[in-house]
Amino acid sequence: MNKMIIFDEYIRQGEPSQKEKAQIWQTAIGLQDVDGLKVSAYLVETAKENIEEKITIDEVQYRIDNYYKTQANRQNETETRTEEADKVSARISKILSNDTFSFSPVEYIAIHRHLFTGIYKFAGKIRDYNISKSEWVLNGKSVLYANSTEIRATLDYDFNQEKQYDYQNSVFEQSIRHIASFISGIWQIHAFGEGNTRTTAVFAIKYLRSSGFKINNSIFEKHSWYFRNALVRANYNDWKNNIHATHEFLMKFFGNLLLNENNELKNRFMRIDWAETPPVILQNDDISVTNVPVNVPVNVPVNVPVNITEKIVLDLIMNNPEITYDQIAESISKNRKTVQRIIGSLKSKGIIERIGSDKKGHWKAKKSYEL
Protein backbone atom coordinates (compact mmCIF):
# COMPACT_ATOMS: atom_id res chain seq x y z
CA MET A 1 0.00 0.00 0.00
CA ASN A 2 1.71 3.16 -1.16
CA LYS A 3 1.05 5.84 1.45
CA MET A 4 2.20 8.67 -0.80
CA ILE A 5 -0.40 7.74 -3.40
CA ILE A 6 -3.11 7.35 -0.74
CA PHE A 7 -2.78 10.94 0.48
CA ASP A 8 -1.21 12.57 -2.58
CA GLU A 9 -4.43 14.30 -3.68
CA TYR A 10 -4.81 16.07 -0.33
CA ILE A 11 -1.18 17.21 -0.33
CA ARG A 12 -1.28 18.55 -3.90
CA GLN A 13 -4.77 20.00 -4.07
CA GLY A 14 -6.22 20.14 -0.57
CA GLU A 15 -6.72 23.11 1.70
CA PRO A 16 -3.77 23.95 4.00
CA SER A 17 -5.43 22.15 6.92
CA GLN A 18 -6.00 19.05 4.78
CA LYS A 19 -2.41 19.10 3.56
CA GLU A 20 -1.13 19.30 7.13
CA LYS A 21 -3.33 16.44 8.30
CA ALA A 22 -2.37 14.29 5.32
CA GLN A 23 1.33 14.82 6.03
CA ILE A 24 0.85 13.90 9.67
CA TRP A 25 -0.98 10.72 8.69
CA GLN A 26 1.79 9.87 6.24
CA THR A 27 4.33 10.11 9.03
CA ALA A 28 2.19 8.17 11.51
CA ILE A 29 1.56 5.31 9.10
CA GLY A 30 5.10 5.32 7.72
CA LEU A 31 6.60 4.89 11.18
CA GLN A 32 4.96 1.48 11.47
CA ASP A 33 7.52 0.23 8.94
CA VAL A 34 10.24 0.22 11.62
CA ASP A 35 8.61 -2.94 13.00
CA GLY A 36 7.42 -4.30 9.65
CA LEU A 37 3.78 -3.40 10.40
CA LYS A 38 1.12 -2.43 7.86
CA VAL A 39 -2.12 -0.62 8.54
CA SER A 40 -5.52 -1.80 7.36
CA ALA A 41 -7.63 -0.37 4.55
CA TYR A 42 -10.17 0.53 7.23
CA LEU A 43 -7.66 2.79 8.98
CA VAL A 44 -6.76 4.50 5.70
CA GLU A 45 -10.39 5.25 4.87
CA THR A 46 -11.02 6.52 8.39
CA ALA A 47 -7.91 8.72 8.16
CA LYS A 48 -9.24 10.22 4.93
CA GLU A 49 -12.45 11.21 6.73
CA ASN A 50 -10.32 12.94 9.35
CA ILE A 51 -8.26 14.73 6.68
CA GLU A 52 -11.50 15.90 5.06
CA GLU A 53 -12.60 17.12 8.51
CA LYS A 54 -15.68 14.92 8.54
CA ILE A 55 -14.60 13.40 11.86
CA THR A 56 -12.16 14.41 14.60
CA ILE A 57 -9.04 12.48 15.58
CA ASP A 58 -10.85 11.37 18.76
CA GLU A 59 -13.62 9.92 16.59
CA VAL A 60 -10.97 8.11 14.53
CA GLN A 61 -9.64 6.47 17.68
CA TYR A 62 -13.16 5.60 18.83
CA ARG A 63 -13.97 3.92 15.51
CA ILE A 64 -10.70 1.98 15.44
CA ASP A 65 -11.18 0.76 19.02
CA ASN A 66 -14.74 -0.39 18.31
CA TYR A 67 -13.73 -2.01 15.03
CA TYR A 68 -11.19 -4.23 16.76
CA LYS A 69 -13.50 -5.05 19.65
CA THR A 70 -15.74 -6.80 17.12
CA GLN A 71 -12.72 -8.63 15.66
CA ALA A 72 -11.15 -9.71 18.97
CA ASN A 73 -12.27 -13.34 18.92
CA ARG A 74 -11.40 -13.93 15.28
CA GLN A 75 -7.88 -12.48 15.03
CA ASN A 76 -4.75 -14.35 14.07
CA GLU A 77 -1.28 -12.98 14.80
CA THR A 78 -1.05 -11.00 11.56
CA GLU A 79 -4.36 -9.28 12.30
CA THR A 80 -3.20 -8.53 15.84
CA ARG A 81 -0.15 -6.77 14.44
CA THR A 82 -2.38 -4.84 12.04
CA GLU A 83 -4.48 -3.75 15.01
CA GLU A 84 -1.31 -2.44 16.66
CA ALA A 85 -0.35 -0.55 13.49
CA ASP A 86 -3.82 1.01 13.20
CA LYS A 87 -4.10 2.08 16.82
CA VAL A 88 -0.55 3.40 17.10
CA SER A 89 -0.88 5.30 13.80
CA ALA A 90 -4.01 7.03 15.08
CA ARG A 91 -2.30 7.87 18.37
CA ILE A 92 0.79 9.24 16.63
CA SER A 93 -1.45 11.37 14.44
CA LYS A 94 -3.16 12.79 17.53
CA ILE A 95 0.15 13.57 19.28
CA LEU A 96 1.61 15.23 16.18
CA SER A 97 -1.57 17.29 15.72
CA ASN A 98 -1.09 18.73 19.21
CA ASP A 99 1.40 21.56 19.65
CA THR A 100 1.98 21.03 23.37
CA PHE A 101 5.42 19.73 24.33
CA SER A 102 7.70 19.52 27.35
CA PHE A 103 11.37 18.66 26.93
CA SER A 104 11.89 16.06 29.66
CA PRO A 105 12.24 12.32 30.30
CA VAL A 106 8.69 12.45 31.69
CA GLU A 107 7.40 13.58 28.28
CA TYR A 108 9.40 10.86 26.54
CA ILE A 109 7.95 8.18 28.82
CA ALA A 110 4.45 9.65 28.49
CA ILE A 111 4.63 9.37 24.69
CA HIS A 112 5.38 5.64 25.00
CA ARG A 113 2.48 5.21 27.42
CA HIS A 114 0.09 7.09 25.13
CA LEU A 115 1.14 5.10 22.04
CA PHE A 116 1.05 1.62 23.52
CA THR A 117 -1.55 1.53 26.32
CA GLY A 118 -3.70 -1.55 25.76
CA ILE A 119 -1.12 -2.94 23.33
CA TYR A 120 1.84 -3.62 25.61
CA LYS A 121 1.40 -4.38 29.32
CA PHE A 122 4.54 -2.34 30.00
CA ALA A 123 3.32 0.81 28.20
CA GLY A 124 4.98 3.83 29.81
CA LYS A 125 7.10 1.66 32.10
CA ILE A 126 10.89 1.55 32.02
CA ARG A 127 12.10 -1.98 31.41
CA ASP A 128 13.50 -3.87 34.41
CA TYR A 129 15.40 -6.51 32.43
CA ASN A 130 18.30 -6.45 29.99
CA ILE A 131 17.77 -6.99 26.26
CA SER A 132 19.53 -7.66 22.98
CA LYS A 133 18.08 -7.59 19.47
CA SER A 134 19.20 -9.24 16.27
CA GLU A 135 19.76 -6.53 13.67
CA TRP A 136 19.66 -7.10 9.90
CA VAL A 137 22.09 -4.26 9.35
CA LEU A 138 24.57 -5.91 11.80
CA ASN A 139 24.26 -9.41 10.35
CA GLY A 140 22.29 -10.59 13.36
CA LYS A 141 24.38 -8.89 16.02
CA SER A 142 22.99 -6.49 18.60
CA VAL A 143 23.62 -2.99 19.84
CA LEU A 144 24.66 -2.83 23.51
CA TYR A 145 21.64 -1.26 25.19
CA ALA A 146 21.63 0.40 28.61
CA ASN A 147 21.65 -1.78 31.70
CA SER A 148 18.13 -1.91 33.14
CA THR A 149 19.29 -0.61 36.53
CA GLU A 150 20.77 2.52 34.93
CA ILE A 151 18.06 3.53 32.45
CA ARG A 152 16.40 6.36 34.37
CA ALA A 153 19.70 7.85 35.52
CA THR A 154 21.06 7.69 31.97
CA LEU A 155 17.94 9.34 30.54
CA ASP A 156 18.17 12.14 33.10
CA TYR A 157 21.85 12.66 32.29
CA ASP A 158 21.29 12.82 28.51
CA PHE A 159 18.41 15.29 28.85
CA ASN A 160 20.39 17.50 31.21
CA GLN A 161 23.34 17.53 28.81
CA GLU A 162 21.08 18.49 25.92
CA LYS A 163 19.55 21.34 27.93
CA GLN A 164 23.00 22.76 28.60
CA TYR A 165 24.10 22.79 24.95
CA ASP A 166 24.49 26.32 23.58
CA TYR A 167 22.57 26.26 20.28
CA GLN A 168 22.55 30.04 20.05
CA ASN A 169 26.31 30.18 19.50
CA SER A 170 26.57 27.08 17.30
CA VAL A 171 26.58 27.03 13.52
CA PHE A 172 23.53 25.37 12.01
CA GLU A 173 25.30 22.18 10.90
CA GLN A 174 26.80 21.72 14.37
CA SER A 175 23.35 22.12 15.89
CA ILE A 176 21.88 19.44 13.66
CA ARG A 177 24.78 17.09 14.41
CA HIS A 178 24.28 17.64 18.14
CA ILE A 179 20.53 16.95 17.91
CA ALA A 180 21.22 13.78 15.90
CA SER A 181 23.68 12.67 18.57
CA PHE A 182 21.15 13.34 21.34
CA ILE A 183 18.37 11.44 19.54
CA SER A 184 20.63 8.45 18.86
CA GLY A 185 21.72 8.51 22.50
CA ILE A 186 18.25 8.28 24.01
CA TRP A 187 17.35 5.59 21.47
CA GLN A 188 20.42 3.55 22.48
CA ILE A 189 19.17 3.53 26.08
CA HIS A 190 16.16 1.55 24.81
CA ALA A 191 14.13 2.46 27.85
CA PHE A 192 11.20 0.18 26.96
CA GLY A 193 10.73 -3.46 26.11
CA GLU A 194 9.27 -2.62 22.67
CA GLY A 195 8.25 0.48 20.74
CA ASN A 196 11.47 2.42 21.32
CA THR A 197 12.02 3.61 17.75
CA ARG A 198 8.48 4.86 17.23
CA THR A 199 8.55 6.61 20.61
CA THR A 200 11.92 8.19 19.84
CA ALA A 201 10.78 9.32 16.38
CA VAL A 202 7.63 10.98 17.71
CA PHE A 203 9.59 12.66 20.49
CA ALA A 204 12.22 13.83 17.99
CA ILE A 205 9.59 15.38 15.70
CA LYS A 206 7.95 17.18 18.62
CA TYR A 207 11.33 18.40 19.91
CA LEU A 208 12.46 19.63 16.50
CA ARG A 209 9.19 21.47 15.90
CA SER A 210 9.35 23.08 19.34
CA SER A 211 12.86 24.28 18.46
CA GLY A 212 11.62 26.00 15.31
CA PHE A 213 12.72 23.46 12.70
CA LYS A 214 10.55 22.86 9.64
CA ILE A 215 10.33 19.13 9.07
CA ASN A 216 9.97 17.33 5.75
CA ASN A 217 7.35 14.76 6.83
CA SER A 218 7.82 12.58 3.75
CA ILE A 219 11.28 11.53 4.99
CA PHE A 220 9.85 9.65 7.98
CA GLU A 221 7.02 8.36 5.79
CA LYS A 222 9.34 6.84 3.19
CA HIS A 223 12.48 6.10 5.18
CA SER A 224 11.48 5.13 8.72
CA TRP A 225 13.35 1.83 8.51
CA TYR A 226 16.43 3.69 7.30
CA PHE A 227 16.06 5.90 10.37
CA ARG A 228 16.11 2.86 12.64
CA ASN A 229 19.11 1.30 10.89
CA ALA A 230 20.96 4.63 11.07
CA LEU A 231 20.33 4.67 14.83
CA VAL A 232 21.75 1.16 15.04
CA ARG A 233 24.92 2.12 13.17
CA ALA A 234 25.32 5.22 15.33
CA ASN A 235 25.53 2.96 18.39
CA TYR A 236 27.47 -0.10 17.28
CA ASN A 237 31.19 -0.81 17.70
CA ASP A 238 33.18 -3.89 16.78
CA TRP A 239 36.75 -2.66 17.08
CA LYS A 240 38.19 -6.10 16.44
CA ASN A 241 36.70 -6.03 12.93
CA ASN A 242 37.35 -2.31 12.42
CA ILE A 243 33.65 -1.35 12.65
CA HIS A 244 32.94 1.85 14.53
CA ALA A 245 29.84 3.75 15.58
CA THR A 246 29.11 6.46 13.03
CA HIS A 247 26.62 9.29 12.68
CA GLU A 248 27.26 9.46 8.93
CA PHE A 249 23.99 7.77 7.99
CA LEU A 250 21.91 9.55 10.61
CA MET A 251 23.26 12.90 9.40
CA LYS A 252 22.16 12.07 5.86
CA PHE A 253 18.68 11.36 7.18
CA PHE A 254 18.59 14.60 9.18
CA GLY A 255 19.98 16.50 6.21
CA ASN A 256 17.00 15.40 4.13
CA LEU A 257 14.61 15.89 7.04
CA LEU A 258 15.63 19.42 8.01
CA LEU A 259 17.62 20.90 5.14
CA ASN A 260 15.79 19.45 2.12
CA GLU A 261 19.02 17.80 1.00
CA ASN A 262 18.80 14.95 -1.45
CA ASN A 263 21.08 12.40 0.19
CA GLU A 264 20.72 8.85 -1.08
CA LEU A 265 19.14 6.86 1.75
CA LYS A 266 19.93 3.23 0.99
CA ASN A 267 19.66 0.63 3.75
CA ARG A 268 22.16 -1.71 2.13
CA PHE A 269 24.95 0.87 2.45
CA MET A 270 24.66 0.61 6.22
CA ARG A 271 25.21 -3.14 6.45
CA ILE A 272 28.47 -3.92 8.18
CA ASP A 273 29.34 -6.37 5.41
CA TRP A 274 28.54 -3.92 2.60
CA ALA A 275 31.01 -3.93 -0.29
CA GLU A 276 31.05 -1.62 -3.30
CA THR A 277 31.08 -4.56 -5.70
CA PRO A 278 27.60 -5.33 -7.07
CA PRO A 279 25.72 -8.18 -5.37
CA VAL A 280 25.01 -11.35 -7.30
CA ILE A 281 21.29 -10.60 -7.34
CA LEU A 282 20.32 -7.05 -8.20
CA GLN A 283 17.07 -5.79 -6.73
CA ASN A 284 15.05 -2.70 -7.49
CA ASP A 285 14.42 -2.01 -3.82
CA ASP A 286 16.75 -0.09 -1.55
CA ILE A 287 17.78 -3.30 0.22
CA SER A 288 19.96 -5.80 -1.60
CA VAL A 289 21.41 -9.13 -0.58
CA THR A 290 25.16 -8.51 -0.50
CA ASN A 291 26.43 -11.86 0.75
CA VAL A 292 24.54 -14.36 -1.36
CA PRO A 293 25.14 -18.01 -0.39
CA VAL A 294 25.93 -20.57 -3.07
CA ASN A 295 22.46 -22.09 -2.90
CA VAL A 296 20.73 -18.89 -4.03
CA PRO A 297 19.83 -19.08 -7.72
CA VAL A 298 21.19 -16.28 -9.92
CA ASN A 299 19.57 -14.55 -12.86
CA VAL A 300 16.12 -15.13 -11.42
CA PRO A 301 13.64 -12.27 -11.86
CA VAL A 302 12.93 -10.40 -8.65
CA ASN A 303 9.20 -10.75 -8.39
CA VAL A 304 8.33 -12.26 -5.00
CA PRO A 305 7.50 -9.61 -2.34
CA VAL A 306 8.41 -10.15 1.31
CA ASN A 307 7.96 -7.99 4.40
CA ILE A 308 10.75 -6.82 6.71
CA THR A 309 10.37 -9.70 9.21
CA GLU A 310 10.44 -12.26 6.39
CA LYS A 311 13.50 -10.51 4.95
CA ILE A 312 15.35 -10.81 8.27
CA VAL A 313 14.45 -14.51 8.56
CA LEU A 314 15.57 -15.08 4.97
CA ASP A 315 18.93 -13.45 5.73
CA LEU A 316 19.38 -15.79 8.69
CA ILE A 317 18.54 -18.80 6.52
CA MET A 318 20.81 -17.68 3.70
CA ASN A 319 23.72 -17.23 6.12
CA ASN A 320 23.04 -20.60 7.77
CA PRO A 321 20.93 -23.03 5.69
CA GLU A 322 20.92 -25.51 8.61
CA ILE A 323 19.47 -23.04 11.10
CA THR A 324 16.59 -24.40 13.24
CA TYR A 325 13.21 -22.89 14.11
CA ASP A 326 14.36 -22.35 17.69
CA GLN A 327 17.56 -20.63 16.59
CA ILE A 328 15.57 -18.29 14.32
CA ALA A 329 13.11 -17.58 17.15
CA GLU A 330 15.97 -16.66 19.48
CA SER A 331 17.64 -14.46 16.85
CA ILE A 332 14.54 -12.38 16.12
CA SER A 333 13.13 -12.42 19.68
CA LYS A 334 9.92 -14.20 18.63
CA ASN A 335 8.33 -17.48 19.70
CA ARG A 336 8.53 -20.73 17.72
CA LYS A 337 4.90 -20.46 16.59
CA THR A 338 5.58 -17.08 15.01
CA VAL A 339 8.64 -18.45 13.21
CA GLN A 340 6.61 -21.38 11.89
CA ARG A 341 4.07 -18.91 10.49
CA ILE A 342 6.81 -16.85 8.82
CA ILE A 343 8.44 -19.96 7.33
CA GLY A 344 5.05 -21.14 6.17
CA SER A 345 4.51 -17.85 4.37
CA LEU A 346 7.92 -18.08 2.68
CA LYS A 347 7.18 -21.65 1.58
CA SER A 348 3.78 -20.67 0.21
CA LYS A 349 5.46 -17.93 -1.84
CA GLY A 350 7.82 -20.51 -3.26
CA ILE A 351 10.92 -18.73 -1.99
CA ILE A 352 12.37 -21.57 0.11
CA GLU A 353 11.98 -25.29 0.57
CA ARG A 354 13.16 -27.77 3.15
CA ILE A 355 15.58 -30.44 1.95
CA GLY A 356 15.70 -33.50 4.18
CA SER A 357 14.29 -34.00 7.67
CA ASP A 358 13.60 -31.33 10.26
CA LYS A 359 16.60 -32.46 12.33
CA LYS A 360 19.20 -33.23 9.66
CA GLY A 361 17.98 -31.29 6.64
CA HIS A 362 18.65 -27.77 5.38
CA TRP A 363 16.92 -24.87 3.66
CA LYS A 364 17.25 -24.15 -0.04
CA ALA A 365 16.28 -20.96 -1.85
CA LYS A 366 14.04 -21.51 -4.89
CA LYS A 367 13.32 -17.91 -5.92
CA SER A 368 14.69 -14.44 -5.47
CA TYR A 369 12.69 -11.91 -3.50
CA GLU A 370 12.24 -8.20 -2.82
CA LEU A 371 11.14 -6.16 0.19
Image (cartoon, rainbow, N blue to C red):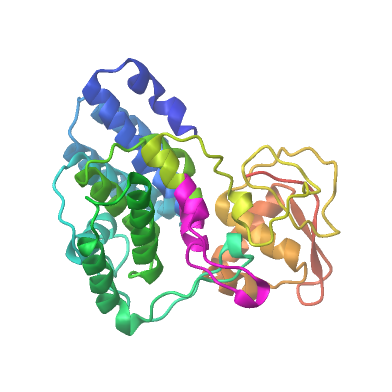
For this orientation, the residue located farthest to the top is 13
Q: Is residue 269 left or right of residue 149?
A: right
Q: Is residue 272 left or right of residue 198?
A: right
Please state which of residues 50 and 354 is positioned toward the viewer in this rendering. 50
Please state which of residues 27 and 104 is positioned toward the viewer in this rendering. 104
**Which span is picked out in magenta?**
227-252
Q: Position of residue 12 (x, y in %)?
A: 36, 18
Q: Disc count in the image? A: 0
Q: Quadrant of the C terminus?
A: top right
Q: Position of residue 216 (x, y in %)?
A: 36, 35
Q: Is residue 145 above or below residue 89?
A: below
Q: Is residue 165 visible?
A: yes
Q: Position of residue 301 (x, y in %)?
A: 78, 37
> Is residue 216 rendered magenta in the image?
no
Q: Can residue 52 be seen in this view?
A: no
Please state which of residues 119 and 295 is positioned toward the viewer in this rendering. 295
Residue sitting at 68 percent across and 60 percent down? 315
Q: Is residue 192 above or below residue 209?
A: below
Q: In this view, does 155 lie to the left or right of 229?
A: left
For this orientation, the residue located farthest to the bottom is 149
Residue sitting at 24 percent across and 43 percent down? 209
Quadrant location of residue 303? top right
Q: Where is residue 277 in the image (x, y as percent from the top left)?
A: 78, 49
> Is residue 233 rendered magenta in the image?
yes
Please state which of residues 238 and 194 is positioned toward the viewer in this rendering. 238
Residue sitting at 32 percent across and 57 percent down? 199
